Image (cartoon, helix red, strand yellow):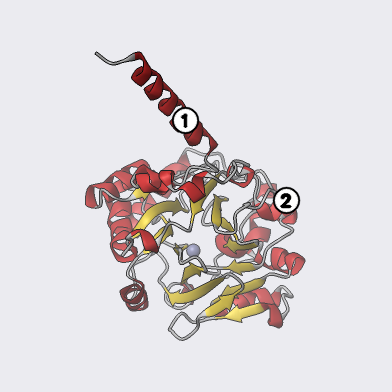
Amino acid sequence: MISGTFRCFVAVAAMLAATVALSRPFFDPRAEKRVALDVDPAFMAQPRDPACQAAQLVSTGGPAPRHPHTLAVRWAGYSNFELAYGGKIILLDAYFDRGSNYPPLGFAARDVRRADVILIGHGHFDHMSDAASVGIRTGATIVGASLTTDKLAAQEVPAAQMRTVTGRGGELLRFDGFSVEPILARHGQPDPQVTTVLEGALAALSAEPGAAQEAEERAIRARGVSDPRVIAEGTIAYLITLDSGFRIMYRDSGGRVTDQEKAAMARAGGVDLALVAVTAEYLMPLTARQALEHMRLYKPEVYMPAHHDAPIGGRRSLWRATEPLFQALKDDNPNLVTVSRGYREPVCFNTDANVAHGHP
Ligand SMILES: [Zn+2]
């Protein structure tokens, strides 16, 4: 028979546990697999952090993380992400004013008023069309391949503000609070049989774009690069290492992995977070095959997909399904945590708990 005192003790303990669970600063997605994260007293003692709840980019005026080692990640459509960490803002790609044929992001390029560094994965318009205007307004350092920075120079971004990289090694960029290793990647080359059939079907089911919409799209496209060299020379993956040791791999196109990526990952071993574009082949066996190649190389603890949303009508108006992709990745690695949120919704990481907690 359980005594009344013991029952009371159990009730109080349960209440305390519930209070602690409610008062943690945010939910780190790694806590799904690692209970230790949620019992770290230093972490649990932090107050609830509004930066990890607000659906507003820090660069557009949202709250910055309170703790210097809290990383807030926000997806902003296609391969755009914002990383807020240690009082700094890193933008990954810059394609915000996508036009009236896209679901609204909830902010415009002109609302982005603060950024320290902008990393551009490659120069296609749907990755860089707002890099020049945002870069000029914020004064952020913009990093990209020469195809990308040449295009920025043509849009009057001062040379002193840009870092041109090849990703072929020896280019480690050090910033206050983090470093960035550019790595030559490769742009996606989807099977034309798949894209022709699917995009043709989607176009047949959509209204023809009007003249105004075509003009709008032309203006946006003009702020990006269309050069076949983007595939093999102009696509850069970035390995970002925060001063807390937390590592992020960012890759904004779903192409095959390169020898440079293999060499970089042989040194790094693995990453905490991978932000990687889903390949443009739509069909699950094909998107999963490419994502498996990426995840087996980067060995992330958490994967957030990119480039899976789509216009509202027309040839490419189909979101790329993430659940079947997540399932295939988890069948391959049951420890993987997959996270996909809506536009601007924060995902926060306690970066004090990373490599020190047994990551390879
Ligand atoms: Zn592209």
Q: Amino acid at mark 1?
A: Leu
Q: Position of residue 341 (x, y in %)?
A: 49, 43
Kindly identify which residue carries mark 2: 61
Which amino acid lies under the numbered mark 2 shown in the image of this protein?
A: Gly
Queried on whether the Cβ of the residue with tag 2 lies below 8 angstroms from ligand 1, the answer reads no
Residue found 42% across the figure and 76% down from its top: 232
Image quadrant for the N terminus?
top left
Counting from the top left corner in percent of width and height, residue 127 is at 56, 62
What residue is at 73 percent from the left and 79 percent from the top?
A: 158
Q: Secondary structure at mark 2?
A: loop
Q: Which residue is mark 1?
A: 16
Q: In this image, 152 relative to 37: left or right?
A: right
Residue 191, visible in the rendered structure: no
Identity of the residue furthest to the bottom in this view: 170
Q: Residue at x 74, y 65 (%)?
A: 138
Nearer-N-terminus badge (2/1): 1
Q: Is residue 176 above or below residue 113?
A: below
Q: Quadrant of the C terminus?
A: bottom left
Could you tell me residue 217's position as x and y percent? 64, 55
| Image-quadrant location for residue 210 | top right
Q: Is residue 154 visible?
A: yes
Identity of the residue drawn at 34% across and 20% down: 6
Q: CA distance from mark 2 to mark 1?
A: 35 Å
**10 Å neighbourhood of mark 1: few (<14), some, or many (≥20)?**
few
